[in-house]
Image (cartoon, helix red, strand yellow):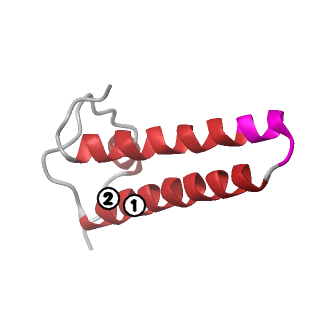
Amino acid sequence: MNQMPTNMQNMQQNQVYNEPPQIISVKDQLYLTDMMSWNLIAMKKAHFFASQCQIPEIKAELEKVGEMHHRHYQQILNQLNGNPMQ
């Protein structure tokens, strides 16, 4: 069995990329799909709870939370489509 030395494994795990790769692995694609799903669900839940809320301050905060998750969803989508982040 061919194993890499531990220090070489650590170097590879700690690499920082300045740009996303042109091709992503299946594992990365699945994680990106999960991230988009999490943000979409959080956005929908925040919108639902804001619509049910009677207290204006809490309603406003829930709406801000929903908008934040919408921005995150759009940022991921833009990155995947090759559009620059805004």
Mark 2 closeness class: few <14, some 14–19, many ≥20 residues within 10 Å? few
Q: Is residue 57 magenta?
A: yes
Spot occupied by residue 79 in the image (x, y as percentages of width and height): 26, 41
Q: Secondary structure at mark 1?
A: helix
Snapshot quadrant of residue 33: bottom left
> In the rendered image of this protein, does residue 68 appear above or below residue 41?
above
Residue at the spot 42% in from the left edge and 56% down from the top edge: 36
Question: Which residue, as the protein is rendered here, is positioned at the far left?
Answer: 22
Spot occupied by residue 47 in the image (x, y as percentages of width and height): 63, 52
Q: Is residue 73 magenta?
A: no
Near-viewer residue (3 or 46): 46
What residue did someone put label 2 on? Answer: 28
Snapshot quadrant of residue 84: top left
Spot occupied by residue 83 in the image (x, y as percentages of width and height): 19, 35
* Spatial CA span between label 1 and label 2: 5 Å
Regarding residue 7, the answer to whether it shows in the image is no
Q: Secondary structure at mark 2?
A: helix
Near-viewer residue (25 or 84): 84
Contact (Cβ within 8 Å) of mark 1 with mark 2: yes
Mark 1 closeness class: few <14, some 14–19, many ≥20 residues within 10 Å? few
What residue did someone put label 1 on? Answer: 31
Snapshot quadrant of residue 29: bottom left
Near-viewer residue (19 or 6): 19
Q: Is residue 75 left or right of residue 53?
A: left
Regarding residue 79, the answer to whether it shows in the image is yes
For the N terminus, which image quadrant? Answer: bottom left
Residue at the spot 23% in from the left edge and 61% down from the top edge: 25
The stretch in magenta equals 54-61
How many labels sit on residues? 2
Residue at the spot 56% in from the left edge and 52% down from the top edge: 43
Q: Amino acid at mark 2?
A: Asp
